[in-house]
Amino acid sequence: MKEQLNSILEDAKKQLESAQTQSETDEIRVRFLGKKGRLTEILRGMGKLSPEERKATGQMANSVRDEIETMLAERFEAVKAAAKEAQFRKERIDVTEPGKVEELGVAHPLTITMEEISRVFRNMGYSIVEGPEVETVFNNFDALNAGPDHPARDMTDTFYITEDVLLRTQTSPVQVRTLLKEKPPIKVISPGRVFRCDTPDATHSPMFHQVEGLLVDEGVTMADLKGTLDSFAKQLFGTSTKTKFRPHHFPFTEPSAEMDVSCFKCGGKGCRVCKGSGWIEILGCGMVHPSVLKVGGLDTEKYTGFAFGLGVERVAMLKYGVDDIRLFYENDMRFIEQFK
């Protein structure tokens, strides 16, 4: 039996020396020390020995067990350290390699333009107000003096959701909401998205952006409107910019006008941008129609006001030399990154 114990110890040493993984080491443990292991079988057979032999064999068996357990513990630590080293080699970081450059985002040209326009008017004391993109027919047309027969109300021009609800065709409904909610003096701008049934091409889109302005107070005149918009044009396009007002018609203003600015590409000499005229039409404006003021319950003998509206895409196209409005909506980073 002593020879068997020595044989078990030698076999355990040899097998542990060749073990490369924790699972192999654990299999050796079971093979020698498990319930059906080789050493356990010898211990079970000690009952057939005499008391003297049992004592000597038991001491030797315990010594063999202790030595095998010590070798197992050492081998477990060795293979564990080897596995960790292998993992470190596999996952090591080469600090000499160049790092990844994190690309910074860039504001969209329409966002840049809208913020520039808003900043100019905020510096003039205007507040920014917003309204819903889904509007009532009353706010979008009726309250703005656009009667039932007005061509803009046709389904070929307007996106209707129901008979009385639509996607707003302009930011002017915010003007109505402001008049219904606030009392003069009123001095606000309302930037936002608007929708019309246009077929997309280089100059048209079914969705675009506007900035609407409204000022209502006592003694407001057309001279105040012209002075405000002239100052706006000079701040946005440069101090040498000139403005020109031409008579026009809008149902919610009277008198109404369109404002041109001197071409900021050629300085008014005539070029491709201004089509040789030296002027570029930039916005519509006028004195708020008395019928619109009455919607807000205002005394038209006491209060007057002016309103204006401009297309953000048009300003951005002119300012940055963009010749196709669709470029603003295609999300092509090659185009957008040019505005860093």
Image (cartoon, rainbow, N blue to C red):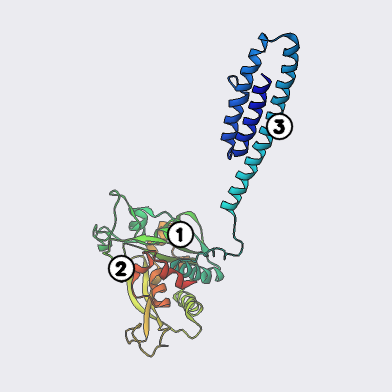
Question: Is 294 located above or below residue 56 in the figure?
Answer: below
Q: Position of residue 203 (x, y in %)?
A: 31, 71
Q: Position of residue 326 (x, y in %)?
A: 33, 67
In the picture of the structure, the residue carrying the numbered disc 1 is 298
Q: Earlier in the sequence, mark 1 or mark 3?
A: 3
Residue 336 visible, this angle? yes
Query: What's the residue type where badge 3 is placed?
Result: Thr
Q: Residues within 10 Å of mark 2 (few under 14, many from 20)?
A: some
Q: Earlier in the sequence, mark 3 or mark 2?
A: 3
Marks 1/3: CA–CA distance: 98 Å
The one nearer the camera, 317 or 212, is 317
Query: What's the residue type where badge 2 is placed?
Result: His
**Which residue is found at the position 65% from the left and 33% from the top?**
13
In the picture of the structure, the residue carrying the numbered disc 3 is 70
Residue 307 visible, this angle? no
**Which residue is found at the position 69% from the left and 21% from the top?**
2
Q: Earlier in the sequence, mark 2 or mark 1?
A: 2
